[in-house]
Amino acid sequence: MLRILTTFLISIFVTFTLLIGNALAVGEFSKTCYDVEISDSTLTAVCAKADGYTPSETSIDLDEYIGNVDGTLEWNDHKFSLTCGNIGLIGNNRLRAECERADQVNYLGTYINLDEHITNSDGRLEFE
């Protein structure tokens, strides 16, 4: 009886740990999304809903979350697309661009890993 109770308690602990771990996961949208594309500053993809099967077409405007800081793409800024060109993707999860430096003459090739802060929340791309 003690063995059954111990096994039951361990299974509850493991299940709870997995649920909390998934709830606190940051980013990593690329693990559950496909057909990822970028147009100007809008990222679009088809992402699995929470059931793991149902696909959902979704998009997010990255200009709200990414900026150009002296030629480098940075989180927690905005409107990168105003001073960056040749915007594209490397794989499904890295945004690349050529961004204007502070001198407004030179440009720098830069990229940022979108999996750091973009997540799939029940089939919707969101910033976290």
Image (cartoon, helix red, strand yellow):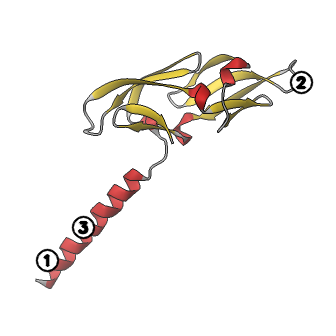
Q: Which amino acid lies under the numbered mark 3 shown in the image of this protein?
A: Ile
Horizontal side, residue 26 vs residue 20: left or right: right
Q: Which amino acid lies under the numbered mark 2 shown in the image of this protein?
A: Asp
Which quadrant of the rendered structure holds the N terminus?
A: bottom left
Q: Which amino acid lies under the numbered mark 1 shown in the image of this protein?
A: Ile
Which residue is located at x 29 percent, y 39 percent?
Answer: 50
Which residue is located at x 54 percent, y 40 percent?
Answer: 117
Q: Give the mark count.
A: 3
Q: Which residue is mark 2?
A: 103
Q: CA distance from mark 2 to mark 1?
A: 69 Å
Disc on the earlier residue, 3 or 1:
1
Q: Which residue is mark 1?
A: 4
Which residue is located at x 64 percent, y 32 percent?
Answer: 66
Q: Nearer the viewer, mark 3 or mark 2?
A: 2
Q: Measuring from the top left, give residue 115's x and y in whole percent.
A: 52, 38
Asked which quadrant contains residue 75, the reply is top right
Q: Which residue is mark 3?
A: 12
Q: Measuring from the top left, give residue 71's x and y in whole percent.
A: 78, 28
Against 6, is 86 above or below? above
Q: Secondary structure at mark 2?
A: loop
Horizontal side, residue 93 vs residue 108: left or right: left
Q: Secondary structure at mark 3?
A: helix
